[in-house]
Image (tube, rainbow, N blue to C red):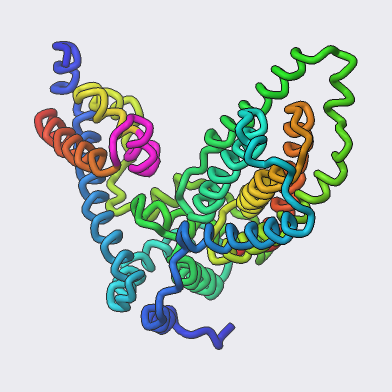
Amino acid sequence: MTPDAQALAWHCPGPARQANVMRSRTEGALDQDRIWDDLMHRANQGDGAAFLQFLTQVTPRLRGLIRARGRGLPPDLHEDILQEVLLAIHLKRGTWDGTGPVRFWLYAVARHKVVDAFRRRGRRVHLPLDDVAEMLAADPGPAPLAARDADRMLGMIDARSAALVRAVRLEGQSTEDAAARIGVTPGTARVVLHRAMKRLAELAERMK
Amino acid sequence: MTQRPSTEALIRSLAASPPPPPLTARGLAGPVVAALTISLGLFLWLIGLRANLGQALADPAILAKSLLPLALAVPALVLALRSARPGRVVRPGLLILPAAAALALFLARGVQVPSGQILPELLGHSAAACLLSITALSAPATLVGLIVLRRGASLRPARTGALIGMAAAAGTAAGYALHCTEDSPLFFTTWYGLAILIGTGIGALAGQRLLRW
């Protein structure tokens, strides 16, 4: 960190606040991923209680997504669409193979079914994947991290970890794909990623 | 509309249902390879392998006739499965390598032979039989693959269908090569390639209809 950047970090509250946001968001997401992955894994082994818990946790988020996108449609219809999404999650859960977080799988399924449901009811809905990710995120926090601040913080950790964080946490690639790109095993990537997130959290703490 | 059960009741009933069978690599590859084996086996049994197959395969150019389509079929099958998993990224890079190798073989032969001989070699004498056989023989494998992939959740059904059609047609071409005696790369890269493209297109059209969910 150059002296200039340090001065900026100390005197400019914006980046520090956002660094905090990044810390809470990413740590929350990590915890949530672990929980959801575990629940879905057990659910697919036949553990009904785990699947009940998974569906119960994702339902309020899905409901929020549909409500936000379906303004102007009667609420009754929202609940119909929600049920279609939940049914699809059940019918297609065998397609999650555990290589990436179940969260990405869930985003893709939810987006597909919501867009499809609105289209079949004669409404076209524009639903970028980022929106879905945002609305289903663990701990939405006050503001998304600006790319500029993320770049600054990633500049403070080693290049390989920074590349992983950028690919997985900011660009939403699966850990497996990112690992293949930089030439390590997915297990190693997870460890590197976890340490990098801790390091970023410490940096954010220092920048406060 | 009022008959709809409450969402809580739906969640409870879903949680009480047994999990659907997982979509696995073995679950897709098994039936597709079985279908290929049966249709190619019947074909080769009725029509026959080429004479001196063992000797012929010692020639790298003739071996490539089987190996190149195989090198396309395997990654196409892998990508077809991946494309049926929501949230997975599908990069077609693996498909480019065998295609590029085929093009290189084509060009190498093209500069080797005198220009008057290029067209006769390219057209050969069995182009129609080749196209027809590969397309027809790959149809069962494409259909079986599509049936398995209906359990998948492809976000782009036409792409998934195209990939399974490509895998089936390329796999069929690899087997058909054991019968076909036209060994000029000008012939087999052109017509096998075209047959594989036809299979890919059929797969895309069928996938668009069959793989929606």
> Residue A41, position in %: x, y?
31, 64
| Foreground residue among B4 and B136 | B136
Do we see residue B200 in this rendering? no
Q: Is residue A103 above or below residue B2?
A: above
The boundaries of the magenta stretch are A167-185
Farthest left residue?
A: A206
> Residue A197, position in %: x, y?
20, 38
| Foreground residue among B179 and B144 | B179
Quadrant position of residue B101: top right
Question: What residue appears at the point 48 percent right and 85 percent down from the top-left corner?
Answer: B5
Quadrant position of residue B112: top right
> Residue A14, position in %: x, y?
24, 29
Q: Is residue A101 above or below residue A58?
A: above
Q: Is residue B58 above or below residue B13?
A: above
| Foreground residue among A10 and B126 | B126
The N terminus of chain B lies in which quarter of the figure? Answer: bottom right
Question: Is residue A181 located in the magenta-colored stretch of the structure?
Answer: yes
Count the labels in the image.
Answer: 0
Q: Is residue A59 left or right of residue B110?
A: left
Question: What residue appears at the point 58 percent right and 49 percent down from the top-left corner?
Answer: A126
Q: Is residue A16 above or below residue A136?
A: above
Q: Main secondary structure of the magenta part?
A: helix
> Residue B134, position in %: x, y?
76, 49
The C terminus of chain B lies in which quarter of the figure? Answer: bottom right
Q: Is residue A26 left or right of residue A178?
A: left
Farthest bottom residue?
A: B3
Question: What residue appears at the point 36 percent right and 65 percent down from the top-left corner?
Answer: A58
